[in-house]
């Protein structure tokens, strides 16, 4: 911390406080964005390795030691491919759509706390910001579907819009319930709220996290997050057997890579949000050595890794749902369930058995 203060004082004296504030913010953005993009690359590697293990095969092994350089080989391959724009497509929107998909997935990380006071923008309405910014991602997919001038792409775009809207409502209800028990929209406050209570006082932090009293909502959140990111078994948006590759059908090269990057960045982000809301964020599972020696950001990373691995596990396990089944699960099961649980928790908090205050 002293080193950071020294750097800030030096920078402020060098170019002035206003200019340094801009430069310092850009440095912090790069420090968050670069590791996320690297994590996205290695999530593709982990996905192929984990599914290979489940299929009793080896996965990528050729490029680098045990295939560790395979993600970079894939990126270089896509970078060297020609970006083909269909002759009847809307050129401006066609090029803009992948960027619109990726940007919200990266911008949402601004309010994610990696530790105590380790956050880019520690705003009080962090949860509200996340709800607003993550709902923008679907615009990219819809624009891509419409601007491609392809019936397959348009069908995929419409499916994506309906699916994301359906499951965003369920996720919204879950986040409102977490807000209710935490009493704050600030993500750091939500994490610190899970560090209090009978079990936390005894050092058993993991029993005072929100996953235990809100277990049904945790399950609904994880399943809704899988549907929100259009992953198996909810991947009818790009169902290969029905509509080829959905909105991405006309994309190649860098445009396709940006869609891919946006999807995996969303997976990591929603997993990190699950870790903060339900799994205690940067807090260690038990408040004893050697667990307390591990830095907080590493605990957050480990919890995120466990949740994101569940996405891959679902992909290797379940067959694809029909479109009507996906809609029914969202509207007739998850939304009523989360609404009822919200009311139950609200009543619970007014009784003498309230465990949150």
Image (tube, rainbow, N blue to C red):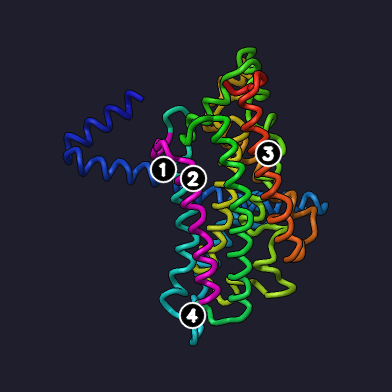
Secondary structure at badge 4 equals: loop
Question: What span is in magenta?
Answer: 119-146
Is the residue under label 1 in contact with that under label 2 (CB below 8 Å)? yes
Secondary structure at badge 3 equals: helix
Residue drawn at the location 69% of the way across and 56% of the way down:
331
Q: Quadrant of the N terminus?
A: top left
Give the distance between the C-alpha atoms of the residues marked 2 and 1, in whole angstroms.
7 Å
Residue 242 vertical position relative to residue 317 in the rendered view, above or below = below
Mark nearest the camera among 1 and 4 is 4
Q: Residues within 10 Å of mark 3 (few under 14, many from 20)?
A: some
- Label drawn at residue 85: 4
Residue 12 percent coordinates (x, y) = 20, 35
Q: Foreground: 102 or 126?
A: 126
Q: Quadrant of residue 212?
A: top right
Name the residue that disc number 3 marks: 341
Mark 3 and mark 1 lie on one chain; the one further toward the N terminus is 1
């Amino acid at each position: 911390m002293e080193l950071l203060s020294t750097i800030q004082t030096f920078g402020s004296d060098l170019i002035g406080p206003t200019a340094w504030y801009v430069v310092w913010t850009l440095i912090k953005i790069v420090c968050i964005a670069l590791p996320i993009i690297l994590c996205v690359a290695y999530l593709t590697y982990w996905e192929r390795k984990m599914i290979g293990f489940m299929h009793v095969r080896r996965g990528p092994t050729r490029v680098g030691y045990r295939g560790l350089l395979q993600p970079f080989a894939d990126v270089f391959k896509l970078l060297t491919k020609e970006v083909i724009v269909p002759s009847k497509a809307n050129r401006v929107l066609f090029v803009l759509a992948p960027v619109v998909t990726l940007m919200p997935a990266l911008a949402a990380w601004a309010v994610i706390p990696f530790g105590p006071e380790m956050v880019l923008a520690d705003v009080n309405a962090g949860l509200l910001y996340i709800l607003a910014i993550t709902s923008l991602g679907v615009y990219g997919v819809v624009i891509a579907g419409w601007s491609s001038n392809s019936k397959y792409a348009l069908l995929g775009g419409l499916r994506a819009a309906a699916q994301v809207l359906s499951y965003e409502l369920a996720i919204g209800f879950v986040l409102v319930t977490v807000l209710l028990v935490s009493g704050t929209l600030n993500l750091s406050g939500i994490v610190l709220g899970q560090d209090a209570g009978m079990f936390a006082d005894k050092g058993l932090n993991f029993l005072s996290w929100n996953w235990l009293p809100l277990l049904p909502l945790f399950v609904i959140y994880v399943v809704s997050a899988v549907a929100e990111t259009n992953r198996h078994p909810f991947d009818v948006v790009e169902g290969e057997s029905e509509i080829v590759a959905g909105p991405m059908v006309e994309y190649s090269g860098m445009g396709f890579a940006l869609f891919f990057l946006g999807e995996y960045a969303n997976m990591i982000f929603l997993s990190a949000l699950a870790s903060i809301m339900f799994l205690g964020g940067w807090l260690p599972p038990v408040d004893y050595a050697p667990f307390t020696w591990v830095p907080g950001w590493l605990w957050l990373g480990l919890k995120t890794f466990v949740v994101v691995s569940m996405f891959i596990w679902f992909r290797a396990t379940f067959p694809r749902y029909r479109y009507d089944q996906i809609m029914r699960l969202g509207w007739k099961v998850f939304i009523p369930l989360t609404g009822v649980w919200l009311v139950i928790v609200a009543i619970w908090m007014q009784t003498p058995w309230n465990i949150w205050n």
